[in-house]
Amino acid sequence: MNRLSALALLLAIVGALALRLPHLDARPLHNDEAVNAIKLAALIDHGEYAYDPHEYHGPALHYFSRAILWFAGVKNSSQLNDITLRLTPVAFGAGLILLLILFADGLGSTAILCAAIFLAISPAMVFYSRYFIHEMLLVFFTALTIGAGWRYVQTRLARWAVVAGAGGGLMWATKETFVLQLAAMFIAAILTWQWERRRSLGDSSLSPSDGERAGVRGNLLTATTWLHISLAVFTMLLVWLAFFSSFFTHWRALEDSFRTYQPWLVRVGGDSPHLHPWNFYLERLAWHPGKHVVWSEGLILLLALIGAGVSLFGKKSSLHHFLALYTILLAAIYSAISYKTPWCLLGFLYGMVLLAGIGAETLWGLCHSRRLRWLTISVLSVLAIQLTAQSWRTSVTQATNRRNPYAYAQTLPPARELVERIEALAKIHPAGHAMTVKVISPESYWPLPWYLRDYSRVGWWDQLPSDALAPVVVVSANLHAALDEQTDKRWLMVGYYEIRPQVFFELYVELELWKKYISTLPPPTDSPSELGEGNWRRAPVPGAATSHRKAT
């Protein structure tokens, strides 16, 4: 890769960060983000991490977050917030562009630079690069594994086998679904190998020396290759051992890393609220209608189709063939599984982005006149600008919009209002953050445990206890009638909050505490000179307009 191409790649990374870093707190933490945050806080403060095979994914997110945040100056969990937590996926999301260097000689500079632009501006890539979950790390380590594998095929150097093995181990340490990526890689590699062998044996246009070199590339089963494969597998197992054992302190997790597939298979088999039809991912990528806008990554999909076509049926390299097969297989596998969450599409979307780069290069090659080239550049630029604007809406201005194709069971802004109201009450309560708070809900109350982590006396119930009263009570709207029977009019329901779509909580506050809180608010504005004669009104209590009505 020449200096000009390297500079263009660097500019793509800068553009990616420009979309990923601003307003990282534009939306409250999702439930999954808050769970990960709790586990990361324990690791930072106490050095404690133990892999749980039942509800959580692998340890890589937490250990890499600890390292990245240490460099960012975060020394304890009190410095964690919505912004600092999301720095890790931002780093890995932008880092995907840097990994494109591994494919430069196989795809060509034009395809690589176009793929870099698409990685930078893809709405899904941007949105989930600002999401403190495991998925972006899984995509990064998958790209590392494939890229290192390609470098090994080209060089036959042992060090690339080691890097590929480390990438596979880190995939394993990130998320259980890595087995789907590995399966797609393995099948695509076998099919590509067979295709390469047949091409080298059947192409009469190759000279004897060219045919011999092609045959060597196609034959991966030499003694040296088996040695390198063994080295890669050993490295993969070493990484698995280190991460799952919490760096040799929690040995039971090694067995748990296999036992985890039992509960996940139950969910895949139908015991889950996340069951969706086969076209769930395609609908979000291709055509997801909103109220006034259609969300679509149609530019990437269309170019990916072109790229897949020329990769499978044109005279392209084995890397092109592998990427097309890998992407198609992985998309088919994920679409066939009934259990679906939208961030899982990132795995095959990455392959689509690489194919889209190939598709863009193909279109450019078909433009033989200067006028046609300028027209192609203009059209692609306009569509890329539209995709960039869509990324900003998806991740910033409409990050919690329930029509947003990537905001799935997203925590809504009223959750922050609820937390802010509790904080305001704690400031006037004699006990401060030692004030008793009871949270009662049969539905999930996450991410509240994270946002209320500074309170030392918080209780959590999934059903109404016999003594449900405390200075502050947060209760599911489904249980409010039963709670009212206990209050004896000494508690007030002072707020109604939709913390997730169709999940409503009510805030009850002890009457005397509420009176004290009201007395601290600014006096009403009643100056006729300010409001006009005959237009006197009482100033609203801060937050009342949003917290006392049903959120929409």
Image (cartoon, rainbow, N blue to C red):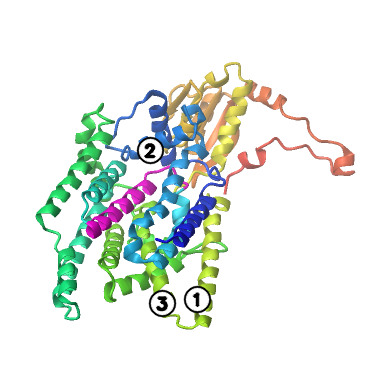
- Judged by its main secondary structure, the magenta piece is helix
Q: Residue 64 carries which label?
A: 2
**Residue at point 15% right, 68% down?**
215
Give the residues in magenta: 130-155
Pick the front one: 189 or 227: 227
Q: Along the polypeptide, which appears first: circle 1 or circle 2? A: 2
Q: Could you say where residue 461 lies in the image, as x and y percent from the top left?
A: 42, 29
Q: Which residue is labeled 1 in the image?
A: 376
Quick one: label 1, few (<14), some, or many (20+) residues within 10 Å?
Answer: some
Pick the front one: 16 or 100: 100
Q: Which mark is residue 456?
A: none
Work out whether residue 184 can be spotted. Answer: no
Name which residue type carries label 3: Gly
Q: In this view, does 382 lie above or below 87?
A: below
Q: Is residue 164 left or right of residue 37?
A: left
Q: Could you say where residue 232 lies in the image, as x and y percent from the top left?
A: 20, 47
**Residue at point 57% right, 49% down?**
552
In reply to whether residue 33 is colored magenta, the answer given is: no
Q: Which mark is residue 365?
A: 3
Q: How far apart are marks 1 and 3 (CA)?
A: 11 Å
Between marks 1 and 3 in the image, the one whose residue lies nearer the viewer? 3
